[in-house]
Image: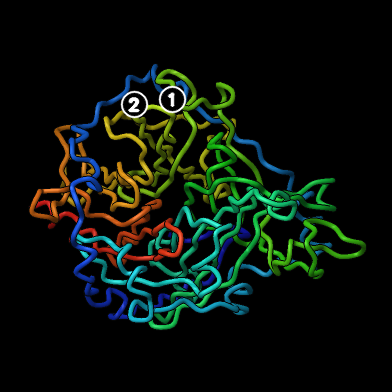
Amino acid sequence: MKQRGRHRRRRRGQALRATLAGTALALTAAATLISTSQATGANSPGGLTALRVGASSQLRLHENLTSRDALDTLSGTMGGNVGVDGVLGDTDHSMRNAADCTTDERAALPVEPTATRAYCWDDADARTTQWRPRSVTTSGDADDDGAWGTHQVILSGWTHRDGRGAASARDRGLARIAFVDATDPDALRYRWVLLVAPRAGGRDFTAVRTGLGGMVWYQDKLIVTADHGDGLLVFDLHRLLRADVDSPAVGRVGHGYSAAGYRYVLPAIGSYDPEGGSCTRGRDHAVPCIGSLSLDRTTAPDSLVATEAAGDRPQRTRLWRYAFSTAAYRTGLLADAQGHVDAAEAYTTKGSAISGALAHRSAGAREAQWYIARPSDGSGGHGSLWRQNGDGAGAATCTADQSHACWGLGTGSLSYWQRTGELWSLSDTAERRVLYAVPLASVDGSLG
């Protein structure tokens, strides 16, 4: 897939290294012993039920883009766009390879099937109680060759959650993204970027506060879940900017710009807002709050997969997809020329509290398979990963009691790297924060 117009970029055609797939990771014996009380998804969520066209009206979005003049003003006053390459050329954190992860961290990995690649964050990020990793997307989503220029890249979205104390309350809800240079699979490095929104006609910016439950990098755009799941925010990866003031403030400071101590910011270029009004959790016929996102390259055109955020009570969960625009001047955007976004198809599943979902149709298959990640029903247990279609559901079993609690601890969103065949996810558990990949073929093979 090629970028067009002003977004055209040079394609290097770099081949992925043979070692990207890695070798299977050995898990500790403790990780494979999951008690019945920790089992999740013991009852199958069954097959997917298609929603009628009229029933999907609550899923309709409307596009609202920031003026290009405001974005250009902000870029100009902050010294110009640095792009993804500028951030990756200035990484200041290293990820630990699986062998250097702690026993507790490795215990967060899936039990069946096992991960073939796993990485842990540097010590400060691994142990923070204030920030939580929620979502992942990669340059495998961004482009079908799996690369962005000369780099393979992983993006991981984190949200500030600790509201205790004046300083923590000020930062609560801040959203940041780790830009991880994964070109060398044996030496991953990353730099944090703060999400912001332009204001005052582009002469200033403010912090974006959102849960980042879902995130997809497609072409030159990054789409994330908005605050409380109420719609989506969209960013342009060409418009990464550098802050020149190091202070706790966010925005213009005197004659410069500060980003709460972060060196780089990514300003939003627009949003997709529900046409039916604010979202409501736990009501079957209301506008749903969006919980997670992923990309499906097996549809025509490519599509954005969304899930309904969990409510206060168990319920059927809606899953749906939006088609990406095919217009050359609208790279990475969803809407038609009039700014409307309708769901291309929608389903419900009996699975509740979904943390991530992926749709993928193999070559020659009659329909797409939907892979649904769910957390543990108990405290601290492994989650489950169900494969569903219209006929039923299946999941791996990994213990003598036939438990389906085989997926990662505190599982986050899902992302499929088509070139390598890897399914990426991450754990969202204090001091057990691991970024990992499992071959999608192994997921299918684990179902027997």
In space, the residues marked 2 and 1 are separated at their CA atoms by 7 Å
Q: Which residue is mark 2?
A: 315
**In this rendering, is residue 404 above or below 287?**
below
Residue 248 has which mark? Answer: none
User: Quadrant location of residue 258?
Assistant: bottom right
Display coloring: rainbow
Q: Which residue is mark 1?
A: 282
In the image, 286: left or right of 90? left
Q: Position of residue 13 (x, y in %)?
A: 41, 75
Which residue is at a point 19% across and 32% down the rendered structure image? Answer: 47
Which residue is at a point 18% across and 40% down the rendered structure image? Answer: 42
Query: Disc 2, disc 1: CB below 8 Å?
Result: yes
In the image, 236: left or right of 40? right
Which residue is at a point 59% across and 71% down the rendered structure image? Answer: 191
Q: Amino acid at mark 1?
A: Gly
In the image, 333: left or right of 394? right
**In this rendering, is residue 124 above or below 55?**
below
**In this rendering, is residue 21 above or below 427?**
below
Furthest residue toward right: 254
Q: Position of residue 347 (x, y in %)?
A: 31, 29
4 or 439, nearer to the observer? 439
Q: Secondary structure at mark 2?
A: loop
Quadrant of the rendering where the N terminus is positioned = bottom left
Which residue is at a point 34% across and 52% down the rendered structure image? Answer: 380
